[in-house]
Amino acid sequence: MGVRKHMGMGSWLAVALAVSSLLLVGAGDSRAGVSDDGELTSWSDDSRHGSRMGGPAPATTLELISPARRDGAERRATWLMPLGVPREDSACTYDGGIPLDDIGDPASQLSPAPTGLWRFVAGAADEFVLYDPLYPDTNCQLTMVRASFVFFGEGHEEATPTTTWDGIYVTVYANSPDDDPDGAPNPDLSGDQTGNVIASQWVEAAELLNEVYVGGEEYCKPYWQIDIPVNIAVAKNTRYWLSLLPQFIGPPQTAWCISEDPGGCGALPSYRGFELFEIPFWTALDPGNIGDCPDAPPQGTNKKLSFALFGQGVPPNFGACCDVSDPIGGPDACRDVMDPSECSGAFEVFHPGELCFSIAC
């Protein structure tokens, strides 16, 4: 794994239909319907548009329900299954809730096609805070991210994270003064980011763990749950924004599942962006869930994303090692070390209890 460090349905539908009309003139009307095989077709009926362009066209969000291809695991038991790694520190964990059995999930994908409609980046982000009133000045080392995604569009039947994705970018952004992510995916599709990035880590598809298909007749929406190993340092009691961006050339597309937990009083909405459809980074997720599945809450009730974080408290001898011979902000100016003995070079200075993201060497 490589690490890169700093260096409303109404409104969405209107935008998506308007842009689709501009891009796909004369492609037919836009409506929801039921196909011959019983699937709900997309609201903008992109599959019919795409037939005039040599293939399907992208969509802004999960707008169809695919029948479960087979029986899968049970939702709650799967979400709570052990990680299979050393026991996490409870102060360094976060549970954003299991996936909601409803549609409206935002597209999240970097699709580096050479040209055309399938060359795009669509992303989403949600906030997290690792609260710890007992030891507020210590930090956390995140070691695993658990999340769930659903494939949709042409080819979704055979798609899985480990066989379809090239990998996934796990990015933690700082909180902006406007309480949204203080950075965004680079529009050049390089996988880099702009703005105030705490850390961004590329994880190969082969490194993903505990891939589980969740589905069955009792569920409206089948999806895939995965565990993503990471190594990202964050401070406690600080708001950050998590972005999970799978990379692969579509179709199909992938969407990050909305959470069953609507968030408490004062919770911020999650955000999305899809500039192909003129949805800038970052636009508040609105309305969120669509309310089309049985037993789903009313439309717009749930606007948070489903993910969980696991980590360990930073040990007392952990610190930042600064190379004073390197210019401030240089790529090798700072590194996090586990022990002072690892920072003993002639021009190295050890800062106990600090992390590179929080100091300037």
Image: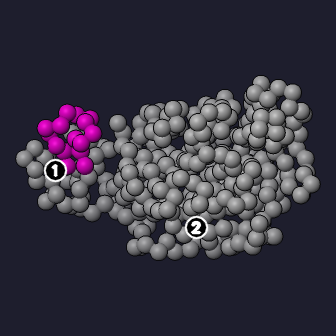
The residue depicted at 60 percent of the width and 56 percent of the height is 164
Q: Which residues are magenta?
A: 321-335
Is residue 333 shown in magenta?
yes
What residue would you read off at disc 2? 211
Residue 3 versus residue 309: which sits nearer the camera?
3
Q: Residues within 10 Å of mark 1 (few under 14, many from 20)?
A: many
When asked about the image quadrant of residue 141, the answer is bottom left
Is residue 332 shown in magenta?
yes
The residue depicted at 47 percent of the width and 62 percent of the height is 207
Q: Position of residue 49 (x, y in %)?
A: 82, 36
Report the amino acid beneath label 1.
Phe
Q: Earlier in the sequence, mark 2 or mark 1?
A: 2
SS assignment for the magenta stretch, majority: loop
Mark nearer the viewer, 2 or 1: 2
What residue would you read off at disc 1? 350
Q: Position of residue 97 (x, y in %)?
A: 61, 60
Going by the image, does 203 lie left or right of 235?
A: right
Disc 2 from disc 1: Cα separation: 40 Å
Helix, strand or loop at disc 1? strand
The residue depicted at 73 percent of the width and 68 percent of the height is 215
Report the amino acid beneath label 2.
Glu
Helix, strand or loop at disc 2? strand
Q: Is residue 313 above or below residue 50?
A: below
Q: Examine the rendering and report whether any part of residue 180 can be seen.
A: yes
